[in-house]
Image: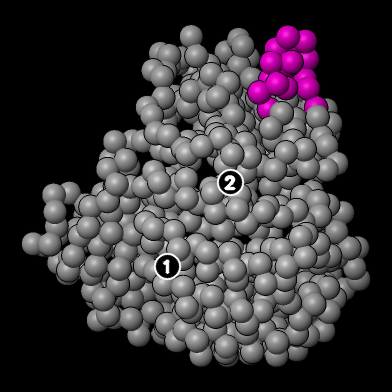
């Protein structure tokens, strides 16, 4: 009988990408995905070491899993990702019921380590110091029938004082352009409409093979792939952002006019302490160039509040950049210490209550700006790629949700003469915005158009693409083998 698995992912898009590879390997080894809410023979926790309370979340989950494992002989627990890379054997010491610990550089080892743990009846901890196999050459089971993650690089060559990623992911490693495009083409061949190119600093792509214009060229090459309707990328670094990328975005029809550009701070003094190799004037000049080339561009950002030594004057500088930048949305974070980073030992740690008060002011300002910008879109026609699971209240409001080309979330009414049978995730619709809120738009009129897609067919049938690595041919769809009967009292993460 096939063993079932469940993967719980914490953290960034790169972890989501890695989890798809982990699922692909497990299915190649004969595992099948556990049905939602059912017990699983294997639980994999793919961890993050960057987000706040990462350790508490991990050990909290492991604590919940302990009695379930005791009640389920043969169940295994594996911990991978950035926190596993950092904490190594500490995880097994604190949670001896864990069977496998693996790092960011050897995600391809998971099936072997699981088998070894069963055979030896003891925990297996394997952490490598450098990349063993590029993740994108491994099998993958994709989470979406209509949108796919494609990694162009792993690792980071920067030394930001607040960030632990370089020590956990290693130096930047770039894939060859042909490999990236082959993976994109393979996904599109199975109906995927949208890809997001991933990298820790995606626009520094090409540094390993000596072509500083490689990322712009890659975007343009994506424009020649028939059937690829939307291309996004995340996250670029302002210091490495070049004009040729702006030109490629503006001149390549399927590249979305959406840019996530991390600011972190508007204070030049704080940026220097962060080792962010740009200043606020440089940051704003990039935004000016983007909007000159693409007036409809939606620009989002990351901002840290309360970095060590931040004064009220520094914070006011951040607020001023936010006012000038007019971000459509922002991911705002309260600074917290990350052991192993230079910032953790810096003088001038800002009191929690001061950080909270500044954070509240920043969120209020950004919400007001986002609301003003969104209200400008009322009455406009938007094209939406219909999404699954993005509208928490869709069932109550009888709406569905989708993403506009600029990345904005739109809740819409799937009704009107234009509807061709039912609207499904993966279909493409056009509608008119009727209401704006700070974090979303609403379109309550009849649809103007509805295009049923192959991605929608696959989503409706519950099919997801699986890839065997870019060098092994195109992905294929298929229903997983029948899952064994669920066991009461098992894990239901």
Q: Residues within 10 Å of mark 2 (few under 14, many from 20)?
A: many
Residue at the spot x=68%, y=52% of the render?
175
Asked which secondary structure carries label 1, the reply is loop
- Residue at the spot 14% in from the left edge and 67% down from the top edge: 446
Residue that numbered label 2 is attached to: 17
Magenta span: chief secondary structure: helix
Per the rendered image, the range of residues in magenta is 110-125
SS at badge 2: helix
Residue receiving disc 1: 254
Tell me the CA gap for discs 2 and 1.
22 Å
Q: Is residue 385 left or right of residue 78?
A: left
Does the image show residue 101?
yes
Residue situated in front as seen by the camera: 351 or 95: 95
Q: Is residue 388 left or right of residue 307?
A: left
Q: Measuring 77% from the left and 20% from the top, which residue is drawn there? A: 123
**Quick check: is 103 in the magenta stretch?**
no
Give coordinates of residue 361: x percent, y percent: 59, 79
Q: Is residue 328 visible?
A: no
């Amino acid at each position: 009988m096939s063993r079932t698995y469940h993967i719980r992912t914490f953290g960034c898009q790169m972890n989501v990408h890695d989890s798809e590879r982990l699922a692909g390997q497990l299915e190649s080894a004969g595992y099948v995905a556990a049905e939602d809410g059912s017990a699983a023979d294997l639980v994999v926790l793919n961890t993050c070491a960057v987000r706040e309370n990462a350790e508490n979340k991990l050990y909290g989950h492991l604590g919940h899993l302990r009695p379930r494992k005791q009640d389920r002989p043969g169940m295994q627990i594996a911990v991978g990702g950035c926190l596993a890379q950092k904490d190594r054997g500490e995880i097994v010491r604190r949670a001896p019921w864990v069977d496998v610990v693996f790092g960011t550089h050897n995600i391809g080892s998971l099936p072997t380590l699981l088998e070894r743990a069963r055979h030896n009846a003891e925990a297996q901890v394997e952490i490598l110091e450098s990349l063993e196999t590029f993740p994108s050459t491994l099998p993958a089971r994709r989470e979406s029938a209509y949108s796919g993650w494609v990694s162009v690089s792993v690792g980071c060559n920067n030394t930001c004082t607040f960030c632990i990623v370089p020590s956990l992911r290693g130096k930047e490693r770039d894939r060859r352009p042909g490999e990236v495009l082959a993976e994109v083409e393979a996904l599109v061949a199975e109906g995927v409409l949208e890809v997001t190119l991933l990298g820790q600093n995606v626009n520094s792509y090409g540094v390993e093979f000596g072509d500083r214009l490689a990322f712009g060229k890659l975007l343009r090459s994506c424009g020649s792939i028939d059937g690829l309707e939307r291309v996004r990328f995340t996250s670029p670094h302002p210091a490495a952002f070049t004009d040729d990328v702006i030109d490629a975005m503006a001149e390549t029809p399927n590249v979305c006019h959406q840019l996530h550009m991390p600011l972190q701070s508007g204070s030049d003094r704080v940026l220097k302490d962060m080792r962010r190799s740009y200043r606020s004037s440089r940051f704003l000049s990039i935004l000016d160039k983007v909007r000159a080339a693409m007036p409809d561009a939606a620009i989002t950002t990351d901002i840290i509040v309360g970095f060590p030594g931040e004064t009220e004057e520094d914070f006011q500088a951040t607020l001023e950049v936010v006012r000038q930048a007019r971000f459509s949305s922002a991911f705002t974070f309260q600074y917290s210490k990350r052991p192993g980073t230079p910032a953790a030992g810096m003088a001038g740690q800002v009191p929690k209550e001061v950080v909270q008060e500044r954070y509240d002011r920043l969120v209020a300002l950004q919400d007001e700006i986002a609301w003003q910008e969104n209200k400008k879109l009322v009455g406009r026609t938007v094209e939406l790629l219909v999404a699954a699971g993005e509208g928490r209240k869709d069932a109550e409001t009888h709406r569905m949700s989708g993403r506009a080309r600029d990345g904005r979330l739109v809740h819409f009414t799937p009704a009107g003469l234009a509807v061709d049978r039912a609207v499904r995730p993966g279909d493409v619709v056009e509608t008119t915005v009727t209401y704006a809120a700070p974090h979303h738009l609403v379109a309550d009129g009849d649809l103007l158009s509805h295009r049923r897609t192959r991605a929608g067919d696959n989503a409706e049938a519950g099919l997801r693409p699986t890839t065997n690595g870019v060098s092994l041919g195109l992905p294929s769809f298929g229903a997983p083998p029948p899952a064994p009967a669920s066991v009461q009292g098992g894990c239901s993460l």
